[in-house]
């Protein structure tokens, strides 16, 4: 599994993804949380884009992440009596004394599991921590075949002021390993600070999935009931779908 989100990227994460991501999956996951009466676990909680809102409406939510810089940002947002709810743990071997009624892994967390044994191990570990009738929801994007072949070359996907007079920009480059179903990604960030131009790169990999591969994977796991939706409105898969939203239930 990748080592996620170095300090610089954690620092600017909220600025970038509240703009890029909230309109995509925000309502879907928060609605699932609202409908859950018991304990909830968010895997890959990050800086708390969803988590902090869940706490505001009284959800009994907990969060884990493997990236200490991301958790450090989230830590500053929580009251002291809520800070025990987050911890640095991995989806492969996290530990809690309690079971959960809902476990979510939003925004491509599952794609950071590069090997099939990790993927199956993660599914089964989550299964063990769900109460009967509990749900595990994760999402992965549907691969764009043209983009997999051609890749992306220094495309600017974000540019804004992070404070008055100081701009930040991010470019993304990708190259695919089709045999091993991995996308090699480089984020290049440049920003102005104290009258200096700063730069930093972050390189990581994502594992892409196809529909029947996902179905076979879940069917090999301890989960016996699941559905795959085609968007965050709850619609079935069709030719316009851009995401696989996988809902697994412990029966």
Image: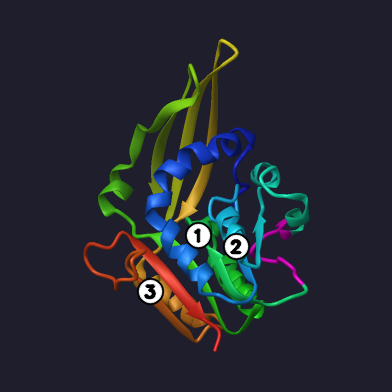
Q: CA distance from mark 1 to mark 3?
A: 14 Å
- The residue located at (66%, 42%) in the rendering is 73
Q: Give the structural element (helix, strand or loop) at label 2.
A: strand
**65 relative to 163 in the view: left or right:** right
Q: Identify the residue under disc 3.
A: 228
What percent of the width, then of the height, locates residue 224?
50, 87
- Residue hosting label 2: 42
Give yes or no for contact between labels 1 and 2 (Cβ–Cβ under 8 Å): yes
Residue indicated by mark 1: 106
Report x, y in % for residue 141: 38, 58
What kind of secondary structure does the magenta stretch mostly adopt? loop
Residue 100 appears in the rendering: yes
SS label for mark 1: loop
Q: What residue do we see at 62% from left, 64% from top?
A: 58
Residue 107 appears at what percent x and percent y?
Answer: 48, 55
Residue at the extreme front of the image, as rendered: 57
Mark in the foreground, 2 or 3: 2
At horizontal 67% and vertical 52% (from top left) the residue drawn is 66
**Circles 1 and 3 in contact, beta carbons < 8 Å:** no
Relative horizontal placement of residue 165, taking residue 101 as reference (left or right): left
Mark 1 and mark 2 lie on one chain; the one further toward the N terminus is: 2
Alpha-carbon distance for marks 1 and 2?
8 Å
Gap between marks 2 and 3 measured at Cα = 19 Å
The local crowd at label 1, few if under 14, some if 14 to 19, many if 20 or more residues have their Cα within 10 Å, is many
Q: Residues within 10 Å of mark 2 (few under 14, many from 20)?
A: many
Q: Determine whether 228 is above or below 201 in the image.
A: below
Q: In the displayed structure, does residue 185 sit left or right of residue 194? A: left
Does label 2 or label 3 sit earlier along the sequence?
A: 2
User: Which element carries disc 3, helix, strand or loop?
Assistant: strand
Residue 157 percent coordinates (x, y): 37, 35
Image: magenta residue range: 85-96
């Amino acid at each position: 599994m990748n080592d996620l989100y170095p300090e610089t990227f954690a620092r600017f994460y909220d600025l970038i993804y509240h703009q890029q991501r909230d309109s995509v999956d925000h309502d879907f996951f928060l609605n699932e949380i609202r409908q859950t009466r018991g304990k909830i676990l968010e895997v890959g909680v990050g800086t708390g884009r969803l988590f902090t809102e869940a706490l505001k409406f009284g959800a009994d939510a907990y969060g884990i992440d493997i990236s200490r810089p991301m958790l450090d940002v989230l830590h500053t947002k929580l009251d002291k009596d809520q800070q025990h709810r987050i911890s640095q743990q991995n989806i492969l071997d996290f530990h809690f004394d309690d079971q959960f009624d809902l476990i979510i892994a939003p925004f491509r967390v599952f794609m950071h599991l590069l090997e099939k044994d990790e993927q199956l191990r993660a599914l089964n570990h989550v299964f063990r921590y769900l109460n009967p009738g509990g749900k595990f929801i994760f999402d992965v994007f549907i691969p764009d075949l043209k983009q997999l072949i051609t890749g992306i070359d220094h495309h600017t996907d974000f540019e804004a002021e992070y404070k008055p007079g100081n701009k930040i920009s991010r470019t993304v480059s990708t190259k695919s390993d089709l045999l091993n179903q991995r996308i090699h990604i480089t984020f290049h960030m440049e920003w102005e600070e104290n009258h200096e131009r700063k730069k930093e790169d972050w390189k990581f990999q994502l594992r892409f999935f196809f529909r029947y591969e996902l179905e076979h994977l879940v069917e090999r796991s301890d989960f016996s009931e699941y559905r795959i939706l085609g968007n965050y409105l709850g619609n079935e898969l069709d030719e316009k779908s851009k995401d696989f939203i996988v809902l697994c239930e412990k029966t």
